[in-house]
Image (tube, helix red, strand yellow):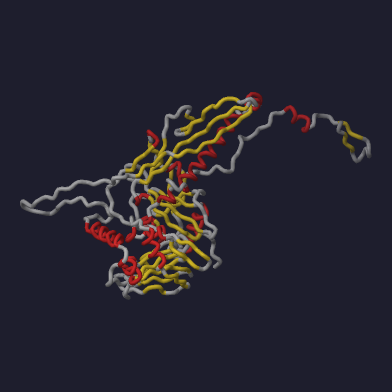
Amino acid sequence: MTVETSPEAGLEPRRQSSLGTAAARNLATTTKSAPQMQEITSRWLLRMLPWVETKGGTYRVNRRLSYHVGDGRVEFVQDGAHVHVIPRQLGELALFRGFEDVEVLTAIADRCVQRDFRAGEVLVRRGTPAEQIHLIARGRMSQTSVGKYGDEVTVAVLADGGHFGENALVDTDARWDSTVTAQTAGTLLTLSRSDFAAVLSSAPGLRNHLQHLDALALRRQNHHGEAEISMSAGHTGEAEVPSTFVDYELHPREYELSVVQTILRVHSRIADLYNGPMNQTEEQLRLTVEALRERQEHELINNREFGLLHNAAFKQRIRSHSGPPTPDDLDNLLCRRRGTKFFLAHPRTIAAIGREFNAYGLYPEHVDLGGQQVPGWRGVPILPCNKIPISEDNTSSILALRTGEDNQGVIGLRQTGLAEEYEPGLSVRFMGINEQAILSYLVTTYFSAAILLPDALGVLEDVQIARSRH
């Protein structure tokens, strides 16, 4: 029994006159929250992608026939301070795309000479003779030229895996049309025209390959590299009207639905006795589905087969001119496609965008997205996605997407109408009870993503998001 003392009574105890709160709590029902989960994010990509029904589990993307013959990136291997180009990676260059004689490619790779450069060094100057190709193993450099009014303009920013001067190997009159200056220290490999000619003289297969490329270049193409649709316009009288047809890719890409699965286990005693006021099985399932959707968005971004970061076309990958994400960089990314629906960036990248805008005296506008105000630029919302990776050197990427089948954009793929469907494209199947009285549920979702045209997705790569000290 609880007793109290008063100053007047000295040590004489006072009897308790009512029930204490500690005892009363034993008879009270507490007010409690549903189970909370820190992993849950806004998952804007899943919300913004138009989802296309994919019966048969496969989606085929048919495109017009294109004649692009190489625009990839070259990979290297490092042996101490020495860098070597991987022979098969030379196939990423337009000259060698489709050429598979490893012995000849190895001979070419062996003739590449390593060159280390320092920040600020001018690697080539505009107007001088171009006599070698440069393969960038490490580092960052800018290509500049002279604008219409005599001022210096930046043409492109090059970095690891890039190359320039490919025409110098086959054109004896080639000259550099831009100046290339190193922004950081790094390493590149050069192949001279004379070394290439020495290999070419003893490789008849390579000569035949180059002749095939010459013939390919003579085929009429539009500026996207697609087979041109012939037509005439502005003619009068009885001019002969050209005939044409639209040629298609012979081997279009097919996307198979991927899967994310897990088995949820709940003991029957828990399911039977501890369901008030919340259903334990339902709460377990709710949190499992949330985790499944988080993994689904991660795969849509990072999966090497269909993830957006790995499937963006090389021509749609650009780099920041100075490192941090400036308004000019976002404009450069935005102008490469029509009808951009939204930007997607890591929350830390969005913070870096805000800092750079403030440094320019600008403030990102806000866009209404279903009643929610989100930051935007040029009327295009900038949405957060923490699944976009941040590298060890504090760089990340910004994605720009055009979406929808009618817009020839990026689409999500799924199949609905599954057995025991819990949500569209997600099923929960009861698998039975084992000898330990544990109930098992198989939770499954099938999905993928397809890029209908290369310019539907653009990526601003290697964006510096760390705060500068000045």
Nearest to the observer: residue 229 or residue 98: 98
Nearest to the observer: residue 28 or residue 115: 115
Name of the residue lying farthest toward the left: 237
Name of the residue lying farthest toward the bottom: 128
Name of the residue lying farthest toward the top: 272
Nearest to the observer: residue 133 or residue 431: 133
Nearest to the observer: residue 259 or residue 403: 259
- Residue at (45, 45) in percent of width and height: 300
Q: Quadrant of residue 414?
A: top left
Q: In this rendering, would 248 be left or right of 155?
A: left
Quarter containing the C terminus: bottom right
Q: Quadrant of residue 122?
A: bottom left
Name of the residue lying farthest toward the front: 202
Q: In this figure, what is the number of numbered marks?
A: 0
Q: Position of residue 371 (x, y in %)?
A: 45, 42
Q: Is residue 146 visible?
A: no
10 shown above or below 181 = above
Q: Position of residue 365 (x, y in %)?
A: 44, 53
Q: Position of residue 366 (x, y in %)?
A: 44, 51
Quarter containing the N terminus: top right
179 shown above or below 219 = below
Q: Is residue 372 visible?
A: yes
Q: In this rendering, would 103 be left or right of 81?
A: left
Q: Position of residue 211 (x, y in %)?
A: 25, 60
